[in-house]
Amino acid sequence: MKTYAINTWGWRKIIGCGAFLVIVATADLAESQGTLISITGPPDTTHQWGGPLTATGYPEGVSWIATSAFTNVKISIPLDADAGATGMAYLTTKIGSGTTAANAIASSSFSFPSASSLTTVFSGLNLGDGTYYLVIQQTATGSTGNGMWDGTPTPSITSAASVTANGEYWDFNLTSGYPPASPFSEGSATHYEYNITSSPVPEPSAIWLILLGGGVAVFVRECRRYPRKVCHF
């Protein structure tokens, strides 16, 4: 009976710890869903834009720092209407002198919307912890002129606990053939707006939890019935 009591208590501790770890892991995953970072605010009524873009240069960017990993990340920016215009977006781990395509995580082309709206430039990304830079450059003008990346002089920042904004960057005199390698200046009276999210991480289903609970109940019952066969090592 002594061996039975000790081993049963040991198994109960193991099961309890396992259940606790499942709960903690689920809670930790839940923190990585929804908004990673979002910068919004009233429009800049002085300049009417966050930053002008042209087909001959003017790359602009933003940066953020993450101390944890995120999955299925989507990056969107608000662009002002410029029907027919196109651009390129670059996501890198470095900008400025010495930056090459080896520092790029992803790049994609996009079209400016026909009306001012939030435009997705990247989706489905899996990002680890680190410092990231988003740079965009217009590649062709549309029928109404150059495009605009919307901004605000009084930003409202929403972010996950493990993500922080890391500034804005601009270059009005493109001297590099690779936009992220441009000699950027940092800071601006107007803050570029952007929105970065990740998809919700599925939580354990009710059926899975019921099966787990049922398995634990059966195991404990068999321990009581056959302590030496089931619970004794």
Image (cartoon, rainbow, N blue to C red):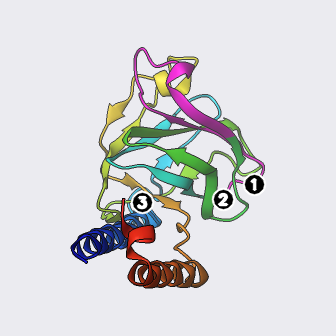
Q: Which mark is residue 81?
A: 2
Identity of the residue drawn at 49% across and 27% down: 180
Crowd tier of the residue under label 1, counting other residues whose Cα lies within 10 Å: few below 14, some 14–19, many 20 or above: some
Q: Position of residue 11 (x, y in %)?
A: 33, 70
**Kind of element beneath mark 3:** strand
| Image-based side of 120 in relation to 175, left or right | right
| Image-based side of 221 in relation to 72, left or right | left
Identity of the residue drawn at 44% across and 78% down: 226
Does 40 sit above or below residue 140? below
- Residue highlighted by disc 3: 36
Of labels 3 and 1, earlier in sequence is: 3
At label 3, the amino acid type is: Leu
Magenta highlight on residue 16: no
**Kind of element beneath mark 1:** loop
Say if mark 1 contacts mark 2, CB within 8 Å.
yes
Distance in Å between CA atoms under marks 1 and 2: 6 Å
Q: Position of residue 74 (x, y in %)?
A: 57, 56
Q: Which residues are magenta?
A: 81-108
Which of 205 and 140 lies nearest the eye of the viewer? 205
Q: Quadrant of residue 146?
A: top right
Crowd tier of the residue under label 3, counting other residues whose Cα lies within 10 Å: few below 14, some 14–19, many 20 or above: many
Identity of the residue drawn at 31% across and 47% down: 67
Identity of the residue drawn at 52% across and 84% down: 214
Q: Position of residue 56 (x, y in %)?
A: 62, 28
Quadrant position of the C terminus in the picture: bottom left
Of labels 2 and 3, earlier in sequence is: 3
Q: Quadrant of residue 106?
A: top right
At label 1, the amino acid type is: Ala
Q: Which mark is residue 83?
A: 1
